[in-house]
Image (cartoon, coloured by chain):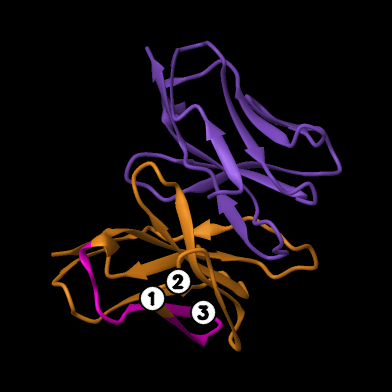
Amino acid sequence: DADVTQTPRNRITKTGKRIMLECSQTKGHDRMYWYRQDPGLGLQLIYYSFDVKDINKGEISDGYSVSRQAQAKFSLSLESAIPNQTALYFCATSAGLAVSYNEQFFGPGTRLTVL
Amino acid sequence: GENVEQHPSTLSVQEGDSAVIKCTYSDSASNYFPWYKQELGKRPQLIIDIRSNVGEKKDQRIAVTLNKTAKHFSLHITETQPEDSAVYFCAAPITGSARQLTFGSGTQLTVLP
């Protein structure tokens, strides 16, 4: 089945370390997203990309960067991790059709802990 | 997100009763309103969505209603079952953006047997 996968699923790191979270999809979707989930705060958009040459900041992009290496891959980097970046991170994809919005399909999530 | 307010944050109902979750949004130009369900330890999944050209949409025991004048939309779950227990998120387009969604803060629904 076509799916969205994330690696790693869990990661513990130390303050100041650089870390990369990776997302791959076999759905053939053009649009990809990175979200952060904190308890009681819902899902906050970090970055999104509508094709390989398109990168856009979301609501909370400070401290993060992304790379869209190919249609199927979208990586999130924390250049210098800090404890308040401890959270559950989700990648998502959606089809790039004529309408602006379509169903988003989420990956399984990466639980990141910054000590 | 600041564009979407979701209430209540927690909701407990008896099995078989109905549950209603409400979201308000700020941008009158918004035209797409999805609802996602996230079971414990799982990824969010779309359960129903509505576009602004209709006022109500149903899918078996779930329905979404949209009031464009009042700028709010609601999720209705009838004949609730234990497997409906989860966190539910609404979403709406971010003000001024044609390409992003902002999510509500979530409602923890517990269906009591």
- Stretch in magenta: A66-83
Kindly identify the residue that appears in the image at 69 percent across and 34 percent down: B73
**The one of B81 and B86 positioned closer to us in this rendering:** B86
**Residue corresponding to mark 1:** A64
Residue A74 on the magenta span: yes
**Residue corresponding to mark 2:** A61
**Helix, strand or loop at mark 3:** loop
Mark 1 or 3 closer to N-term?
1
Dot 2: few (<14), some (14–19), or many (≥20) neighbours within 10 Å? some
Indicate the amino acid at tag 2.
Ser
**The one of B10 and A95 positioned closer to us in this rendering:** B10
Q: Kindly indicate whether the residue at mark 1 contacts the one at mark 2 (C-beta within 8 angstroms).
A: yes
Query: In x, y percent, where is residue B83?
Result: 43, 27
Marks 2 and 1 sit apart, C-alpha to C-alpha, by: 6 Å
Which is more foreground, mark 1 or mark 3? 1
**Helix, strand or loop at mark 1:** strand
Give the color of chain B as drawn.
Answer: purple
Indicate the amino acid at tag 3.
Ala
Indicate the amino acid at tag 1.
Tyr
Q: Magenta region, mostly helix, strand or loop?
A: strand
Q: Kindly indicate whether the residue at mark 2 contacts the one at mark 3 (C-beta within 8 angstroms).
A: no
Q: In the image, B43: left or right of A81?
A: right
Marks 1 and 3 sit apart, C-alpha to C-alpha, by: 20 Å
- Residue A13 position (above or below residue B48): below
Discs 2 and 1 carry the same chain letter:
yes
Chain letter corresponding to the colour orange: A
Query: In x, y percent, where is residue A54?
Result: 61, 83
Marks 3 and 2 sit apart, C-alpha to C-alpha, by: 21 Å
Q: Specify the label residue B71 is tagged with.
A: none
**Residue corresponding to mark 3:** A72
